[in-house]
Amino acid sequence: MHLQNNVVQSSLLHKELRRLIEFKLLTPVFQPIMAVENPRIIGYEALIRGPETSPLHKPDRLFAVARASRLLASLEFACREVSCERFVELNLPGKLFLNMSPISFTDSQYRDGVTREILQRVGLSAERLVFELTESQPLDELDLLCAASDHFKRQGFAVALDDLGAGYAGLRVWSELCPDYVKIDRHFIAGIDKDPVKREFVRAILDIAHRMGHKAIAEGIETAAEFTTLVTMGVDYAQGYFIAHPQALPATELPANLVQLSGASMHRYHDHFTRRVGEIVVDCAFVEPSVTAETLVKMFRADTRLTCMPVVDQGRPLGMVSRAEILNIFSRRFAHELYAQKPVSEFICALSIIVDVNADLKTVGQLISEDPGQNLSVDFIVSDKDQYLGVGKVRDLLRSITEEKLRVARHSNPLTQLPGNVPLYEWVDHLLLHQKAFVVAYCDINHFKPFNDAFGYSAGDDAILNLGRILCAAVDSQQDFVGHVGGDDFIVVFRCADWQQRCEQILAEFTRMSERLMPEATTDYWSTDRQGRRQKFGALTLAIGAVEPDLAQCKTHHQISQLLAEAKQSAKQEGGNRLFLSRRRQPSGAHY
């Protein structure tokens, strides 16, 4: 009797599934995926719900029944269709991430080319689609996963490896798929702020991803502590309930609190001497939109150095025509008869990039490199107040960004990735030269060595990383400077008027953080001080020595260093969490 009931129940669910697919009674909800650096929404993952009155409302049951009924491909096609339609209807920005089970390739209902038909009908370009493939299948189905990845890449879609770390194959799948994105499984994200082992795993994943040029998405973030920890560690993209729940009508902009928390990112080197596009713009001839395609083809064939041509209408840039694309069109049979007299405006690249002359090089680099469909042989147009100015060569852009990254790497602290002594000295000398008022604060952890000896280097590193995060979150990222000059020593250059209030905020945050670092139910511990004496210590405290230099008397960073060393020493002598503002504003030997 029980078996008979199961058969009846299975039959009813099968019929219900067919009904939902046939009439497209499926509702997509969208969860934003945000970029941590330059915080913004870069896309949405589409998730599916059945009707609330249906026994297949929840996605887990919906897809389980589809697998059992051999209707997985049919269901996924229906989900893909409603998701694309709704994504376009809502005019959502960025990319659309769609889940896809490689096993559906073995489904008898699978049809090739369906996605292209859907995109063409709704008016969505292939470059905006990312297919998420899960690696939770056993190793013997690895070939199926690779086949799915190759299938989508050939059609111009981006591929994401979902749930990295949750399945059987792990790094092997990653190495063979070479996806555009890897999504770190929720297991490694949950409680990462309290778990040093998970942090080490995620650091390794991020390091591999960055070396291979893949973008890492931390998914399943549910708390502010998890988010800020991941930001500090240098994760590229973030997703989860803390950022936004999946919604039928999702937000298109990030809330202010997320933007502010992202500002605590320490891996981001804030260069106060930002390089602009204007540094690499070159003068370049252009054509008007009415020029015929035949004329432009002759220009390309006459000069092999031309890789692309800007199209400009009365001073306003419209886009770029690619040499490779238009010559490929004209190589086809009857192409001359069909296209020769058409205006060049019809051949402008869909992915043409136009940027302002004052845009910083790093932002433009992100704009170009974040899109897997971007043709890197096509240069970008530079405008000034919406008027054509010239062209930026992608090779010049990439070379400049590489040079800057190498410079940053040379002068950054390896643990926190914050700028070290050289960038700090450059910035202080710049402020002194231009007579811009500032306050410089030396932040040093009291009794760090005894703590490090007692609880180990991992706990010491956590204290340093957390202090760096606290400092970055407390300053004004637009005008203040945070440097890590070695060990547990940090220097902050304040230009904001409320710097004292921010220092008090730093001390309060550090007090809470240091108490959390202590083992549970532990308020003190025995360790050895720098003189080799064994004594009892409590939670870590922070000394901040601050100086407001007299710009008329201080001329170099060496003089500031002298003042700062004295202020730091005075703050440490007072003990505890303390801010000490030095009365001295000029170095020894200076006179009014």
Image (cartoon, rainbow, N blue to C red):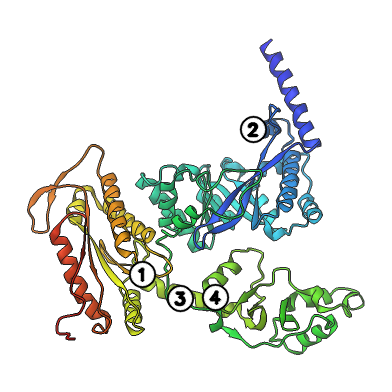
Residue identifier under label 2: 58
Pair 3/1: label in front: 1
Residue 164, x across and y down, in percent:
52, 47
Task: Look at the numbered disc 2 and give the secondary structure of its residue.
Answer: loop
Dot 3 amino acid type: Glu
Pair 1/4: label in front: 1
Disc nearer the start of the sequence (3/1):
3
Estimate how packed mark 3 is, as few (under 14), some (14 to 19) or many (20 or more) residues with alpha carbons within 10 Å.
some
Residue 232, x across and y down, in percent:
40, 56
Are the two marked residues, 3 and 1, in contact with CB atoms closer than 8 angstroms?
Answer: no
As measured in the structure, the alpha-carbon distance from the residue carrying label 4 to the one carrying label 2 is 46 Å
Pair 4/2: label in front: 2
Q: At 19% from the left edge and 76% from the top edge, which residue is drawn?
A: 562
Task: Point out the image quarter for the C terminus.
Answer: bottom left
Dot 1 amino acid type: Pro
Camera-side residue of 278 and 146: 278
Q: At 87% from the left edge and 77% from the top edge, which residue is drawn?
A: 342
Quarter holding residue 397: bottom right
Residue identifier under label 4: 398
Disc nearer the start of the sequence (4/2):
2
Task: Look at the numbered disc 3 and give the secondary structure of its residue.
Answer: helix
Disc nearer the start of the sequence (3/2):
2
Estimate how packed mark 4 is, as few (under 14), some (14 to 19) or many (20 or more) residues with alpha carbons within 10 Å.
some
Residue 356, x across and y down, in percent:
60, 76
| Left or right relative to 422: residue 251 | right
Q: At 21% from the left edge and 48% from the top edge, which residue is drawn?
A: 539
As measured in the structure, the alpha-carbon distance from the residue carrying label 1 to the one carrying label 4 is 22 Å
Residue identifier under label 3: 404
Disc nearer the start of the sequence (2/1):
2
| Left or right relative to 26: residue 546 | left
Dot 2 amino acid type: Lys
Dot 4 amino acid type: Leu
